[in-house]
Image: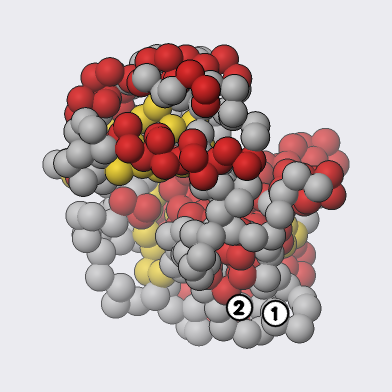
Amino acid sequence: MKPESPSGPLRGLRVVEFAGIGPGPFACMLLSDMGADVVTIDRPGKKLGEPHNITGRGRSVVLADLKDATAHEQVFQLLEKADVLIEGYRPGVMERLGFGPDAVLARNPRIVYGRMTGWGQEGPLAHAAGHDLNYIAISGALHAIGPKDGAPVPPLNLIGDYGGGSLYLIVGVLAALREASLSGRGQVVDAAMSDGAASLMTNFVSQQMRGVFGETRGSNLLDGGAPYYRVYETADGEHVTLGAIEPQFFSEFCERVGVPSELHRAQNDRAQWPRLHDEFARIFRQKTQAEWTAALGGTDVCFAPVLPLSRAQAHPHNRARNTFVEVEGVRQPAPAPRFSRTPSQIQGPAPKQPTPLADVRARWQ
């Protein structure tokens, strides 16, 4: 159920999403949160109304048999009124359905055609199956994440699907919309998760060239190698984070927790890192997570407790900023980022019933 007058900087933007999974729906959720009118084309018989389908929030769903000539033409008529098309199929699928870029741009020359794939539209792997873990594996990202003496650790599917996928797709679509506002011409945005994950590694490519980033996991500044930038266990078996990179923050940490004075100047002495780590680990094991949060939370030592999802919503900072909100009884992350003049808003939960295609066409006249 969408509000009659959605807010957000993308109010008035018309987006057609061909139903998929993962990064495509998440990208469309973000567009909807920012005010876009998102309409998802899904297959007949699709069951709707799953209350915990958070990434499906804030859009209309149209059920259409794309192999039916009448429905096929009706979808094309909808695309003629759209600003953006988003699809996440393997290369060639949309062409076989009759909705490839050439066909769509012929009917609507100004549309921005967003394509979300793992490997991209061409290349040796373009037609191969894959998932986030595979895409980040060839980017250098996965190899860099994990313990020094262990295997690489899957970082959920945040880097490939959502960081290198959804967010790069959004950036590309918005950039293409900007250009289309000047030229009157749309174009294809080829967003590949493998490309995006590689792009996310840009800073580490620079650091490697400078000789300050090594390929041994757990030996660098930001991968847990530095004792002042890592996770520590507390007395109650919970964990806390320390990120005291800057010298003044490191010094404040040492003073607050009682690090021996001879180690106060050892921050950048890699030979002393094992000793610093052991000392910090010993200190953090003396108090519970709650006690450390009370002692160090809100200070300049760059500290935060490690919270599971079930407790993250109750953190005072998240409560103060309404980082999590409730929509029809379902607690979920609020829209981000935040806009001062045209605030985003959730345009309702995932729909419980499909919307007739004719109703959407009438809305878009």
**Which callout, 2 or 1, points at the residue further toward the start of the chain?**
2
Dot 1 alpha-carbon crowd within 10 angstroms: few under 14, some 14 to 19, many 20 or more: some
Q: Quadrant of residue 236?
A: top left
Mark identifier at residue 86: none
Of 330 and 102, which appears nearest the observer? 330
SS for tag 1?
Answer: loop
Relative horizontal placement of residue 302, taking residue 195 as reference (left or right): left
Residue found at x 66% / y 84%? 127
Residue found at x 29% / y 77%? 45
Residue beneath label 2, please?
Answer: 90
The answer to whether residue 17 shows anywhere in this view is no
Mark identifier at residue 126: 1
Most extreme residue toward the front is 262
Identify residue type, mark 2: Arg
Identify residue type, mark 1: Ala
Relative horizontal placement of residue 45, taking residue 84 as reference (left or right): left
Q: Where residue 6 sits: x, y (%)? A: 41, 31
> Please, is residue 361 above or below residue 304 in the view?
below
The residues bearing labels 2 and 1 have C-alpha atoms spaced at a distance of 8 Å
Q: Where residue 340 sits: x, y (%)? A: 50, 15
Relative horizontal placement of residue 7, taking residue 273 as reference (left or right): left
Q: Are marks 2 and 1 in contact (CB under 8 Å)?
A: yes
Of 293 and 51, which appears nearest the observer? 293
- Figure colour scheme: secondary structure
